[in-house]
Amino acid sequence: MGIHDLFSKRQKRARGEVPDVYIYDELPGSLRIQIVHIIRDAFGTDHYGHNLSEGLYDYVNKVLCKEYGVFHLTTKRPYYTSESIFEFFLQEKQAERALDVIELCFNIVSGYIASNQDNYSYFTDRGVEAEDAVSELNERFREHGVGYQFESGEIIRVDSEFLHAEAVKPTLRVLRGEKFEGANEEFLSAHEHYRHGRHKECLVDALKSFESTMKAICE
């Protein structure tokens, strides 16, 4: 379905009511609901007798429960696993744990679903293609002034829109190459350290990534 430039949005822009400073420690409720819509459209609904999309929701649920050390994400027991995930996502107060849900789901969208689009589309009804879902997610982040983007399979922190567009994204694009696999992992690790304020570790991994990149180029 994509993003619609509604009258109310245009009026807010005209009045200058747009965020000019990124926030990192909260995800507005309206943004969370919009993200649920995107995930639902991207995962789709199963055709009768198939359980591809619900199988993916089951995977997300199991990963989160195991990593958090719990048996259930919520006290309620919805019939569909997807509803349990979404209830947890909408109610979770820790922004980082809400971002866990986004990262896991969009890893599946940009990975499994994107690489099996024909087969997946045959057994499910979907409202958006994988690439468009990721683009809409990132646009929603920007729209709400939330300083994160989904790039190369991970949620990364964005401190400057210009820096992200002119430095980070081109770097990630280059490092997607097979020869730069090690450098890419180190670069993303540096990003993760930076997001958590571990600046010394961030610098170490950034330098490792630079060294690995230079070695790959020289070879």
Image (cartoon, rainbow, N blue to C red):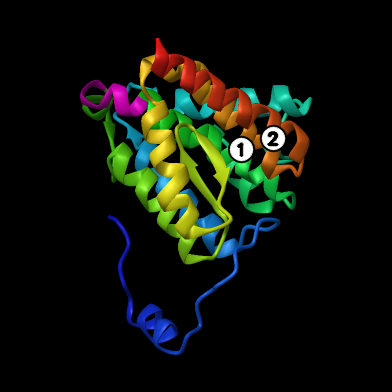
Q: Mainly helix, strand or loop, the magenta region?
A: helix
- Pointer 2 local density, CA inside 10 Å: few below 14, some 14–19, many at least 20: many
Location of residue 211 by image quarter: top right
State the residue lying farthest toward the top: 219
Contact? badges 2 and 1 (CB < 8 Å): yes
Badge count = 2
Give the spatial CA distance, label 2 vs label 1.
7 Å
Quadrant of image for the N terminus: bottom left
Of 40 and 197, the residue lying toward us:
197
Identify which residue is drawn at 30% across, 67% down: 4
Quadrant of image for the C terminus: top left
Of 56 and 205, the residue lying toward us:
205
Mark 2: which amino acid?
Cys
Of 173 and 40, the residue lying toward us:
173
Q: Is residue 7 left or right of residue 141?
A: left
Q: Secondary structure at mark 1?
A: helix
Q: Is residue 115 left or right of residue 27?
A: left
> Is residue 177 a member of the stretch shown in magenta?
no
Q: Is residue 6 in view from this perspective?
A: yes
Mark 1: which amino acid?
His
Residue 175 against residue 149 in the figure, above or below: above
Q: Looking at the picture, how far across and down is residue 216, in whole percent?
A: 43, 15
Identify which residue is drawn at 47% across, 43% down: 168
> Is residue 117 a member of the stretch shown in magenta?
yes
Q: Is residue 48 in view from this perspective?
A: no
Q: Looking at the picture, how far across and down is residue 132, in whole percent?
A: 30, 45
The numbered disc on residue 191 is 1
Which residue position holds label 2? 202
Sequence-wise, which precedes: disc 2 or disc 1? 1
Residue range of the region highlighted in magenta in the rendering = 113-119
